[in-house]
Amino acid sequence: MNKNIINVHNEYKNAENKFLNSDWDGTIISIRKSYEKLLNCFKKIYIDEKGFRAKIKTFSKEILEPEIGETKANMISQMMISQIDLLNSVAHSSHPINRSTASLTLKEASIIFSYIIDSIEPKH
């Protein structure tokens, strides 16, 4: 098979930088470590589709599902899509309520990510 290896880490970094450069108060730091662990797995992904959502779905199917099962893999991929969408949507928001809500959501996701990621043992 002739498939490209996609490193999604840079895409996350771009979203994170956009987020941090919007004068956020630093709450993104708590979720960074969880994302870093999970996105390290992305370095192994083989994919033909374009777009971040397609990459996450392929990653879920090919990498996570064999490791942790379909249910958990689907949950993680949906959370990742939601969190990336959230990062992008609040990156330049000046509305304090939106930022507060986003902060809570990111912290909750960080806890869930950490719990699930700790149960993943990536294949080498």
Image (tube, rainbow, N blue to C red):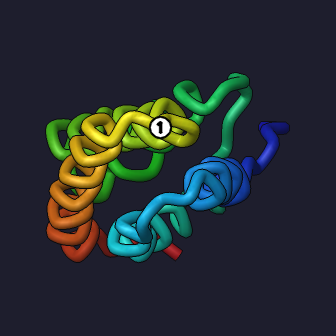
**Position of 92 compared to 24: left or right?**
right
**Position of 102 compared to 93: left or right?**
left
The reply to whether residue 28 is in sight is: yes
Q: Name the residue under label 1.
A: 94
The amino acid type of the residue labelled 1 equals Ser
Q: Residue at x 73, y 28 (%)?
A: 48
**Position of 28 compared to 118: left or right?**
right
The reply to whether residue 73 is in sight is: no
Which quadrant is the N terminus positioned in?
A: top right
* Relative image position of residue 14 (x, y in whole percent): 70, 52
* Relative image position of residue 107 (x, y in whole percent): 22, 61
* Relative image position of residue 8 (x, y in whole percent): 65, 51
Q: In this view, does 10 lie above or below 6?
A: below
Closest to the observer: 67 or 99?
A: 99
Closest to the observer: 111 or 105?
A: 105
How crowded pointer 1 is (Cα within 10 Å; few <14, some 14-19, many 20+) is rated as few
